[in-house]
Amino acid sequence: MKDTLSSIARRTLPGYVHRWIGTQLKGDKYIPPVGKVDFGSLGGLTPISRQFGYDRGLPVDRYYIEKFLTKNAADVKGHVLEIGDNSYTRQFGGNSVTQSDVLHIVEGNPQATIVGDLTNAEHIPSDIFDCFILTQTLQCIYDTRAALKTIYRILKPGGVVLATFSGISLTPADQWGDYWCWNFTSQSGKRLFAEFFPEANIQLESYGNVLAAIAFLQGLATEELDSSELDHRDRAYELLITVRALKPNQT
């Protein structure tokens, strides 16, 4: 009977319908043939949003950033430096933080306690920070080696940098788009940090998959995906890369 029905289906149904029925019966993933992919709401030449998803909820990359910082929250203690503001310092450090500093590249940021460029920051003393929260910054620095040299110098022995940077991303149209220089891979990120930190002291991870990357590029928010869809990792689609790098204790 199955063979008879299959024969009738092949003769009477369009090929793509027959293939769809076959995959449902076998429990396989249905892959639409060429010309039959339904792009739905994502089929336009412009994204749903160009605001990274902020206008719809929590951006997908921020979901991964906060997972990373939650995992390493014990490092956010003592004298902590953060870029732009100290929101993550307060969120993940709490009472473990004894001093909070904020670095900004130009004057005028009321939250900044230090104004400077990481590629040329000799005015920042060496060996003073227990933790440096460096989120979504390295892609906006052309001379990343000079920045990492500074980061290593200003960390205390035993200090930690918690860094995140973009793999797959749109280039923003605001002022930061004028600074945007790089999108990284796990390979490039690890090699850069290994020029300054011992390789054994570097913990690198990547987050993302094809669905999360599409959602992020379209400007969809975390709330529009399930946690199972967000948490699946596919190294071929590195949306976000994270690094925890420890400066060795000096004896």
Image (cartoon, grey):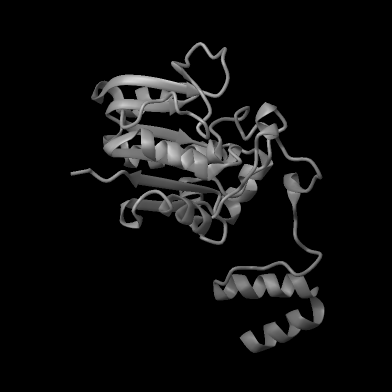
Nearest the viewer among 19 and 54 is 54
The image shows residue 22, relative to residue 110, as above or below, that is below
Q: Is residue 174 left or right of residue 227?
A: right
Can residue 1 be spotted in the picture? no
Q: Name the residue: 62% across, 85% down.
A: 2
**Quarter residue 74 falls in:** top left
* Residue 76 place in picture, x, y as percent: 31, 32
**Quarter residue 105 falls in:** top right
Query: Outermost residue, left direction?
Result: 251
Q: Name the residue: 42% across, 37% down.
A: 151
* Residue 93 place in picture, x, y as percent: 30, 27
Q: Is residue 61 left or right of residue 171?
A: left
Report how many numbered discs are placed on residues in the image.
0
The image shows residue 159, relative to residue 38, as above or below, that is above
Nearest the viewer among 31 and 70 is 70
Q: Name the residue: 65% across, 42% down.
A: 181
Q: Is residue 159 left or right of residue 204?
A: left
Q: Is residue 75 left or right of residue 184?
A: left
Q: Name the residue: 68% across, 88% down.
A: 4
Nearest the viewer among 47 and 236 is 236
Name the quarter where the C terminus is drawn.
top left
Name the quarter where the N terminus is drawn.
bottom right
* Residue 68 place in picture, x, y as percent: 39, 42
* Residue 134 place in picture, x, y as percent: 45, 35
